Image (cartoon, grey):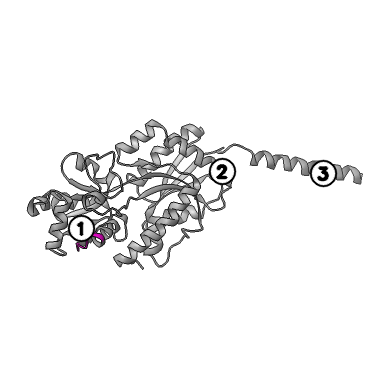
Amino acid sequence: MKRLVRSIVQASVVAGSLVCAAASAAPFPEKPVRIIVPYLAGGTTDMVTRVVGDQLSLLWKQPVVVDNRPGAAGMVGTSGAANSPADGYTLLVGSVGEFSINPALYKKIAYNADTDFSPVSLIARVPNVLVISPVFAERARIQTLADLVAYAKAHPKSVNMASAGAGTSTHLVGELFQRMTKIEMSHIPYKGSSAAIADLLGGSVDVMFDNLPSSLSFIRSGKLKALAVTTAARSPALPDVPTIAAAAALPEYDAGPWFGLLAPSKTPDAVTKKINEDLVRVLQLPVVQAKMREAGAEPSPTTRAEFAEVLKRDRVKWGDIVKASGATVD
């Protein structure tokens, strides 16, 4: 009898092990995948997420659900993703804001940008574009970036620079520009790009270093004039607009925001590897590249290690810009 019981127990253990092994070997994903976007629907982060999410859903034959969880400069959604199960079924599309700017800007944040996530891949890089109010351009007779720099040097602090909020990339790329050109503008922070753009169109503020997708339609319609883009290379969406590096003779100037996919830390290596491979495949699809470039974003697939290096390098770079700007949020 004891021998029979022992045999039954051993058989159960073996069967259980086989079930676990089969489960661990099951192809990913077996159920819907949720991608948290820490901002409102309709913004740049949301746009790039939905473009790749639609294609990943087709590839995986599983729904990919975009979960918009805005608040506290992206920290609400980011901390929610950090505390999600590390199984690959909850992912985050993060940006330079949550991972490079916030750690330097805020004294306390509810996640650790260094340890709470595993980088999967960059998704896209998006230039900021220096746009000027038509009212100000006419009044100050500004047609080029050189005109703006000359005017700002002759009229310190008289040029009003709008942003989507203190400490955002739309603020800090302007701070970097001022530091490198040795000019002084007056910063006017808004609660988001849309309100800032509305006042820029009306002439209440003078210039803005906006995320390109937010301003692109106004530039194309002629309602705003683009003076330069902040990336090292020209944007395919605005091929006739020079870079700040070239137009202002600042070869070191390069301040393009990025968006990337991350998983909670301790997500199995095999899972993040699979997601990386599939995301890179999706980002190489002509339909994805066309949609992103039409909106002003440049698809930028990377390896996991390359994305980790971007996170490390930009945390130092943007941290220095935050300190130089004097911006803090308690």
Residue found 49% across the figure and 55% down from its top: 82
In the rendered image, the quadrant that contains the N terminus is top right
Dominant SS of magenta comes to loop
Magenta stretch, residue numbers:
180-185
The residue closer to the viewer here, 151 or 163, is: 151
Visible residue check, residue 44: yes
Residue found 81% across the figure and 41% down from its top: 11
Q: Position of residue 227 (x, y in %)?
A: 19, 48
Displayed quadrant of residue 71:
bottom left
Q: Report how far apart the C-alphas of labels 3 and 2 lie in the structure.
A: 31 Å
Look at the numbered disc 3 and give the secondary structure of its residue.
Answer: helix
**Local crowd at mark 2 within 10 Å, few (<14), some, or many (≥20)?**
some
Q: Is residue 61 left or right of residue 316?
A: right
Q: Position of residue 58 (x, y in %)?
A: 47, 32
In the rendered image, the quadrant that contains the C terminus is bottom left
The residue closer to the viewer here, 37 or 306, is: 306
The residue closer to the viewer here, 192 or 281, is: 281
Residue 108 disc label? none
Q: What residue does disc 1 label?
A: 161
Kind of residue at disc 2: Val
